[in-house]
Image (spheres, rainbow, N blue to C red):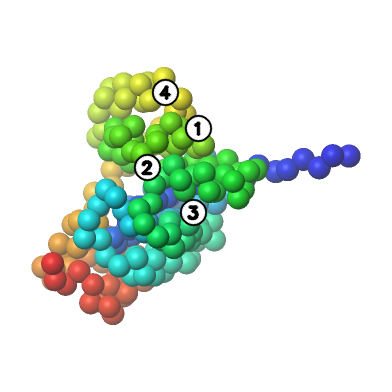
Amino acid sequence: MKDISVIQKIGIMGGTFNPIHNGHIQLAKCAYETLKLDKVLFMPSGNSYLKKNVLATEHRVAMTKAAIAEYPCFELSLEEANREGNTYTYDTLQRLTSAHPDAKYYFILGADSLLYIDKWVKPEVIFELCTLVCAVRNDSDMSVLRRKGDELEQKGAKIIYLNMDKIDISSTAIREGVRQGSDISAMVPETVLRYIKQEHLYEED
């Protein structure tokens, strides 16, 4: 009898994670549970062509590893962190699908990113190689998102809208809070808070 490969459903949480925070964890958990994924890859970026003045990769990787350690369904991926030069989502997906052709990938992103994803490098390749999972906050303007989604689907995108409560946390607010000496313990996992204090991160501009 011919062997039938089991297709794995794998989520991808990419980003600078500067730093990773509770919102990232909550979004990944929601996607994992709602879509019944086999696992979620947390993929800190290396050099981002979209963002400048990002913390050293080694620190962002260490914080991500610490944040997800307690979740067996989450896995750290160094696919982008270890790559030299700018990293692009289309290239990452090509590498992943080439290495794991039996996997089905779900790229998890926020509503803001969905509105601009067709401005990324080679979006048509992204649409071909994964399903977009868009986190829709309960305060989002769904009419705008749906119009954009319809436009992207005409270009080949596959989109799943993931309803979840608003997450009022941002990496920018966390960095500013550290600079001001504010309490950020409600915004990041305890392990990440310890690392930030230990390494004296974000204390200066």
The answer to whether any part of residue 30 appears in the image is no
Counting from the top left corner in percent of width and height, residue 151 is at 35, 21
Q: Quadrant of the N terminus?
A: top right
Per the image, the residue denoted by label 4 is: 155
Per the image, the residue denoted by label 2 is: 109
Above or below residue 119? Residue 88 is below
Pick the residue in front: 53 or 70. 53
Disc 2 is placed on an element classified as: strand
Per the image, the residue denoted by label 3 is: 41
Q: Quadrant of the C terminus?
A: bottom left
Q: Quadrant of residue 202?
A: bottom left
Q: Is residue 123 left or right of residue 49?
A: right
Label 1: few (<14), some (14–19) or many (≥20) C-alpha neighbours in 10 Å: some
Per the image, the residue denoted by label 1 is: 128
Instruction: State the separation of the CA atoms marked 4 and 1.
Output: 10 Å
Q: Is residue 73 left or right of residue 200?
A: right
